[in-house]
Image (spheres, rainbow, N blue to C red):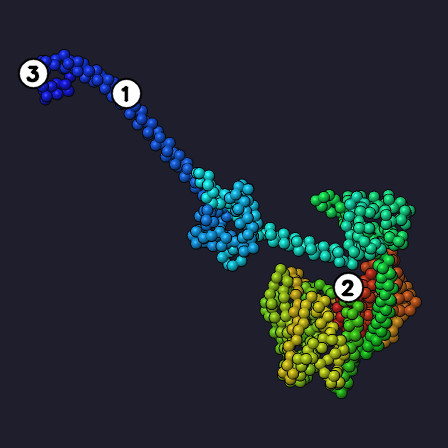
Amino acid sequence: MHRLLKRQIRKYLSIEQEGQLSEFLNAVDEAYLGFDSDLGHLENILEKSSQELFKANQELKKAVVSKTEEIEKTHSKLESVVNNVNEVIFQTNSEGEWIYLNPMWEKITGFKIDSSIGRKTFDFIHPLDIEGCKNKVRELISGGIHRGFNELRLLTNEGSFVWCELTVRATSDVDGNINGLTGTFKDISERKRLELENKKNEEKYKLIFEKSSVAYLVIKKAQFIECNQACLDLFGVKKREDFLLRNVLDFSPEFQPDGLLSEVKAMEMIQKGKSNGFNKFDWIHKKEDGTEFPVEVALNSVNLMDGNVLFVVLNDLMERKAVEQELILAKEKAEDATSAKAQFLSTMSHEIRTPMNAVIGVTHLLSEDDPREDQIQNLNILKLSADNLMTLINDILDFSKIEAGRVDLEAVDFNFRSLVGNIASGFKVKSKEKGLDLIVDVDPKIPAHVIGDPMRISQVLNNLCSNAIKFTEKGSVKIKVVFLGVDKNIVNLQFQVSDTGIGIPMNKQDQIFNSFSQADSNTTRIYGGTGLGLTISKKLIEIMNGSISVESLPEKGTTFMVNLDLSISHKSMPKVGFTTESIKDIDKVKGLHVLVAEDNEMNILIIKQFLKKWEISYEIAMNGQIAFDKVKTGNFDMVLMDLQMPIMDGYHTTINIRKLKEERFVKLPILAITASAFSEIRKKVLEAGMNDFVTKPINPDELFAKIEKYVN
């Protein structure tokens, strides 16, 4: 019997009752046994299902973990994209309040996200743009549109506004009810700036096009499609509609001046303009009334959205040709005047310098001929007067050359400290005579050798130093050169020439650089001078791309400051000195045989004296023809050639000598003796075949150095 049935029988039935119910109990026992069998089978099924369920649960856990990780990665990537996108991504609720903003919000507006969330969207929109935004929202909510686009201005934290492009759509809940908006803001400030700039340019160019006095025309397929008022005036047309859409040939004669049909030539010129992008040519047009007139046509090919067109500029040649004729006549007159002035100055230069050569030359000779003590003073007065006269002559000639634009600058290596030292040495005697201290201060950082025009720099500094000493009766004169820096092998210097002299009033300081001007009319009478020195110095400094300024107080003194840029020299080549301190090695020139081609008796006398002192033998030729004949038959080491001689001048004499077949005539050194200071004369000298030149009045040191240079 089944154990459960036994337990119940013993609990509730007696033995008699168990016997009476035996059949019933047997039936129940069979049911119990059947139930156990079914329960065992069910348990087996449940056990198996439980194992399968456990396995499935484990696999599901793994799948959930994997999907969770995948979702987290995707979310991280999405968050990274959202955080780094160049647009503001936003979401609002149905009340129009921000509920989400990405980090670009802070970059564009400057507002913090935390302080913006929960605030009304319209609080951040320009008042003039709010109504347009509201209309878009109404259309979205009503279902009129699925997505809205708009341009608006967002408020920034600084109180300004930034232009943005809005893209927005409505969002819905599970029941399909509108619960807010989502979309993006894109910063279009740069685009708006360019659009505004383009609009301004368009308006500007349109105004220029329309209001210009130059005739402008736009052509497409030989038809006029646009023009300005000047073009209508040029063709004598009153109404624009009477001109536009008409053909080029409507305003052209049948033939052009070269004999070609206007129709053929027009097509040829238009095609050339399209092919090359540009074409310029002369054309004969005719006005509305049939009057013909010449124009210069400039075609420019322009690609527009609706195709290629030609932008045409028309210049009326009638007026231009009249102006050109006037300019030609004016130019010819100016050239004639300049030529006459140059010729006059060249002649005066020669005529004045020739006697001055005699005066200064004889003074040199007398000074070196052991004069008596009572003669020295007279010689010094003579030399000083001659030097002053030469200074006046040189100032006038230099001023004329600068005015004519005929100043050529050299770019040579020179010893900078030697140049400043030589300039100072030249003023030692004069300053000592006046009891002035002459101070020289050169910045040690300045390179020893530089590249520039030492002659012009010396001319400027000599003028400033001369003025400083002239206008100073007690105290000192100081020459200071300041190093201002170096940039790409260019050294920037400031020359300062200071004195403790009479000074210049503030209201006169601008005038002192004017031609023939001094600070006071009494200055010329008391101190002398032409009033050209500072004018020439200023112009020379400007030609050298420098500047000059002045600081001064009356009775306290004056400081002139000159700023110049000079190239630093890498060659450091020594220059020949032409000062009276130059050491002459007579042995280098002793024994030379020189031909002196000169027609002026006084010049011959002076040159002869110099040559005798240096033990150089010589012959004299009084004109160019004699000089040429002597060179052909003689044996000379050098020729000193005057430029202006009778029968044959120095240029033609030199040219003829160079044409002689023997090689010695090609190599023979020929030095020009010239009274002209003009650069074109010097250029002409070299072009004629001469090696170099010595200017009059002849400086013996310069002449000796040139002879020594070309015979050795």
Q: Residue at label 2?
A: 710
Amino acid tagged 2: Tyr
Amino acid tagged 1: Ile
Q: Residue at label 3?
A: 15
Helix, strand or loop under label 2: helix
- Residue 468 position, x and y percent, is 68, 79
Pointer 2 and pointer 1: residues touching (CB < 8 Å)?
no
Pointer 1 and pointer 3: residues touching (CB < 8 Å)?
no
The label shown at residue 364 is none
Q: Nearer the viewer, residue 133 or 142?
A: 142
Helix, strand or loop under label 3: helix
Q: CA distance from mark 1 to mark 3?
A: 39 Å
- Residue 665 position, x and y percent, is 84, 59
Q: Residue at x 78, y 77 (%)?
A: 392
Q: Residue at label 1?
A: 45
Q: CA distance from mark 3 to mark 2?
A: 167 Å
Position of 5 with respect to 413 (left or right) is left
Q: Quadrant of residue 321?
A: bottom right
User: Dot 3: few (<14), some (14–19), or many (≥20) neighbours within 10 Å?
Assistant: few
